[in-house]
Image (cartoon, grey):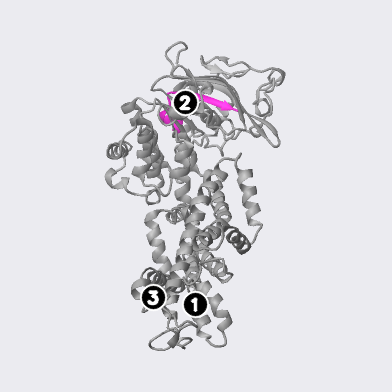
Amino acid sequence: MKPGSDRLLDVEELTVRFGTEDGAVLAVDAASFALGPGEVLALVGESGCGKSVTALALTGLLPRSAAVSGRITFAGRNLPGLAERELRRIRGRDIAYVFQEPMTSLNPVLTVGRQIGEVLRRHQGMGGSAARRRAAELLELVGIPLPHRRLGEYPHQLSGGMRQRVMIAMAVACRPRLLVADEPTTALDVTVQAGILDVLRTLRAEIGTAVLLITHDLGVVADIAERVVVMYAGRTIEEAHAEALFARPSHPYTRGLLDAVPNPARHADGGLREIPGRVPVLATSPDACTFADRCGHADGVCRTRRPAFARGPAGHLVRCWHPLAVPVPP
Amino acid sequence: MTVLELTTADTAAAAVPGSRRRALRRVLRNPLAAVGLVVVVVAVLAALLADLVAPFPYDRTNFGAALQPPSPAHWFGTDELGRDQFSRVLFGLRASVGVGVLSVALSLAVGVPLGLLSGFYGWLDPVISRLTDTLLAFPFLVLAVGLAAILGPSLATATIAIGVAQIPAIIRVTRGETLRLRGMDYVAAAVAGGAGDGVLLRRHILPNAVNALIVQATVNVPAAILGEAVLSFLGLGLRPPNPSLGGMLSSAESLFRDGPWLVVFPGVAIVLLTLALNLFGDGLRDALDPREVRR
């Protein structure tokens, strides 16, 4: 997205610190990205890179031990400046979430209809029968057959894929402008996954919801995302249109991620290629590239100076002193 | 994966209302619990219908037939004033069941909200928990007897005393459940959907804590009935001539040599009722506890 055009969500220099018993942990380090209306942006990275924390920070869902700084502008309002009451009104109505665990994210003692209806009653002041009718429409929208019968069922009567569809139905009940999907398909098997991604695509077409998709699954990214932001150790390290990122990854870490995707054609010679080492857990933001210790291209400057998030040889943003110029072989 | 899914489904199943009916069916498959339930139902009916069932008013004296052993006319015999013991046991049952149910209702009405608040708001927890600990430091009966002595003897004060003495246990159970449920994914999901604290507590936490509370209540009702018996025995419960099972035992104590049946029937009634409640409660706990389901 071009800067200056109308943005739905603009995250600037978002920093999140957790005070833990073993000292401070820097979970998100000055992350910046933006999202236009109706756009699908994928936030990609390994476990612990700060992508889920970023998602939760948007509407103030982090525990009190988290110190959040930076600006999060959503539809012209700075979210961290809002009172809890205001945020509650935004959650579920303007910004809705779908989480990773469909098996446990539904209340076991409430029927599906009640749980969807609750959101409608809360944010749209609907009455019982109107909420029920709308809930049935929503179930139909997310591809659940016999929606009227499902309304009266309890979560344990549904499969994992069905439950995730119900979660999505709840999330989009109020036609949110932004849907944050945090690993929505990770707990599901591959065929169900494809179905859920189809649902997200449909919703975007029908409701015009922008989607912030958080995932570590590059297959999912390629399937649905328009733009991709790669995070590493709390920093955003590369941002590009999906095709550009897959064709010409500029950060060695992104390249490493792509190389680690199992691909029979490319890995015919032998085994998966891994990135050596682990994601560091940082207490403070180092004046260095956080990937330097795992990077084959690292030199002195990488370890002593912080790279800026700037346009690289492939024409998109990358945070690297020595961005790669070589495209990925097809 | 399938194994994991089944486990989750069963765990969830134990908590939903539809499966509460199924849980009841499971209870009835346990013979001891089924017997317990039948005895409880009979006792409750007898207590409710005492006016219709009892052959004599509980305070009708007949000095011509004092201290009669059990006979076709007086099934449980008569006391030193010639009152029909069968009738008095039925009315005594009414007092016992009434105190049992009402005092447990009182303890739930006070304990559940306090437990929810204590578990949900970390800053309130130390205050409520220390108060609970203080009350728990007194044995249940000592606390109940002490309170009844302060409030004065009557059935109402016995009910209040026993109810108050049971509040700490209810707070504990509710608080524990709240702490557990607060960390559930569906509570987090509800927060992300914009739910406020009231909705979280009412809709998401309390309904899921009900199973634990049902179990605690089935333990507390017999304890309350015994508590009433003790208070009445000590003269802190129902005043004569109104019968309560404990009061009957108390007045029969001095007549034990001349009329042992005066001790036996109310005593047996107390034992049977509390035993039946405990058996039913145990069965219910097994049926509702997801870990116990697949033994």
Mark 2 or 3: in front is 3
Give the alpha-carbon distance from disc 2 to disc 3, as whole Å. 66 Å
Could you say where residue A16 lies in the image, as x and y percent from the top left? Answer: 60, 27
Which residue is rendered at x = 63% and y = 49% of the image? B131
Could you say where residue A157 lies in the image, as x and y percent from the top left? Answer: 37, 51
From the viewer's side, name the closer residue of A1 and A9. Answer: A9
Which residues are drawn in magenta?
Answer: A219-232
Give the alpha-carbon distance from disc 3 to disc 1, as whole Å. 17 Å
Q: Which mark is residue A86?
A: 2
- Pointers 2 and 3 in contact (CB under 8 A)? no
- The residue indicated by pointer 1 is B266
Q: Is residue B161 magenta?
A: no
From the viewer's side, name the closer residue of A135 and A308. Answer: A135
Give the alpha-carbon distance from disc 2 to disc 1, as whole Å. 62 Å
Near mark 1 (Cα within 10 A), the count class, few <14, some 14-19 or many ≥20, is many
Position of residue B249 relative to residue A213, above or below, is below
From the viewer's side, name the closer residue of A81 and A174. Answer: A81
Near mark 3 (Cα within 10 A), the count class, few <14, some 14-19 or many ≥20, is some
Q: Have a look at marks 3 and 1 and say if they share a chain.
A: yes
Near mark 2 (Cα within 10 A), the count class, few <14, some 14-19 or many ≥20, is few
Could you say where residue A53 lies in the image, as x and y percent from the top left? Answer: 55, 31
Any part of residue A99 in sight: no
